[in-house]
Image: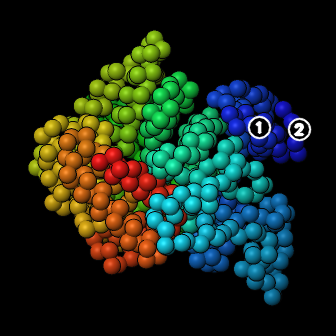
Amino acid sequence: MVAGSDWQTGLIFFSGHGYALFFVPIPPAPDHSLILKNRFLTLTTQPQLLSPDELYGDFFRDVQLSSVFTDSKTFVDCIPKMPPDTLIVLYNSEKTKPDFDLETFVRSNFVVPEKAGSHYVSDRSISTAEHINRLWDHLTRPADMPIEGGSRVALPHPYVVPGGRFREIFYWDSYFTMLGLRDCGHMDLIHGMLDNFAYLIDTFGFIPNGNRTYFLSRSQPPYFALMVKLLAELEDNDSLVKYEPQLRREYDFWMSGRSHLTTGLSTEKRVVRIGDKTYLNRYWDDTPTPRPESYREEIKLAEKAEKRGTAPETLYNHVRAACESGWDFSSRWLADTTSMATIHAADIVPVDLNCLLYFLETMLRDANLRDGGWKTAYGDLDPLVVARQQAIQQTFWNEETGFFHDYDAIAEKQTDALTLAGAFPLFFKLATAQQARRIHDRLKADFLQPGGWVTSLHNTGQQWDWPNGWAPLQWIIYRGLLNYGYVETAHEGRNRWLALNDKVFKATGKMMEKYNVVDDTLTTGGGEYPNQDGFGWTNGVYIRLLKEVGKR
């Protein structure tokens, strides 16, 4: 251990590529022992990290409500030029002066972040694939050094960010980014990103939405098990051995609260009991406040919701739950399918989340069989896998529509929303052959558009709805259809998506976060921020799908 300042202790991380000195903020505690785990050292105690709203109090509120920045995420990513306590004292002194200007104060005392990849100049004369290969370096961040007052949670290994306003690692984005990194030969980045996620699990007990302090109250769709499987397939090694402890802890995070469910309590944290014996999961965030990165927007939204009789605290919980889903935002979370003021995401039991947790359970079952029979706090794993498989069939399948639907735990019935989430059972081979045929027919008739697969059939103005298509869902549908032999349709959707990506790149020099797949003459949009370019998971899925074309 290397001595640091009063607020830091130095740790040396070991990797296959050398050594790196890494500092983390450590609060006073009786013991800060170190344990060797997964090629790097980590703390047995969790560092105390405050989000910007907690750190700056009234000053934070003043800045976010004054529209100093058009995007509320900009300020929470700013880096202070002095310790936060000193800065707050200065602010309280300066703001009483008659010539005080808040924007000048903020820009003078903070380093304002740039968009990721903003200095990269595209060459539209090259192929899309070559553009992506050149762009990886501009989206890669080195191992972090913590900065007092900054919101970034430091990570010990390099990683790839999505791009644009997204200047940090994002959990579920990273799996789809890795698909492309694999085919571009960046195995070192895949290793590093997996080790970063293992570090986050060891430190916080779960993988946060992203490595920001304002993301530490929620996770994102649990793709860590798929990342581990990806690495094992690439290197023909048993990555499951290395990451098994973190897989167990992630499962414990998602299942926490199950033992507390009683006859009178059907939901606890991320667990939902349906009937007497069926346990499934939902998205959840128990922080009843506006998200710091969307503070101004959610204050205004709460005012609209209050007029409908929804308490602000309830609204904030539902908004945060939707953000944990990654689908922020979509008609699948809205009671009236149109207004954000009716969001009730925490009431919804999502089919895609439960498919992902089924896969996590199968990975742990395999590890269990190999290791000789350890048990979870909830019993043997094999019955849990079978129980979830049966629950997915019984809870989400709709014989009338021929599709899988989300389930409303409060209304105790399926929702009406038809979205690409309903095709996740194809990806995980959870559908019967007859169900797969009906899903295929529905996908081909309603969801396949000129530019690929559209996310939902509702045009609400939300970004995870019609007419938008997203790279991760293109991959899920492509692989899901191939799993059941619908090769021609899978290839058609793939080819349309690749062609749209190529067309937009030639016209703009950009790879976008999302695309209008219904009308490629129009710019996509919707949601609470402008369309972003970069873009990590679009790049990854493009490269992987292009590789699939080569296989053909």
Residue drawn at x 39%, y 76% is: 523
Circle 1: element type: strand
Circle 2: element type: strand
Q: Residues within 10 Å of mark 2 (few under 14, many from 20)?
A: few
Image quadrant holding the N terminus, namely: top right
Q: Residues within 10 Å of mark 1 (few under 14, many from 20)?
A: few
Q: Is 236 displayed left or right of 293 in the figure?
A: left
Q: Is residue 191 visible?
A: yes
Residue 19: which numbered mark, if any?
Answer: 1
Which residue sits furthest bottom? Answer: 99
Between 481 and 373, the residue placed more toward the observer is: 481
Residue drawn at x 18%, y 61% is: 446
State which quadrant residue 18 falls in.
top right
Residue drawn at x 81%, y 65% is: 81
Between 302 and 34, the residue placed more toward the observer is: 34
Residue drawn at x 75%, y 51% is: 146
Residue 279: which numbered mark, if any?
Answer: none
Kind of residue sitting beneath label 1: Tyr
Which residue sits furthest top? Answer: 372
Kind of residue sitting beneath label 2: Ala
Between 261 and 468, the residue placed more toward the observer is: 468
Residue 3: which numbered mark, if any?
Answer: 2
Image x and y of residue 543, in percent: 43, 54
In this picture the colour scheme is rainbow
Image x and y of residue 383, in percent: 32, 21
Image x and y of residue 214, in percent: 61, 55
State which quadrant residue 53 falls in.
bottom right
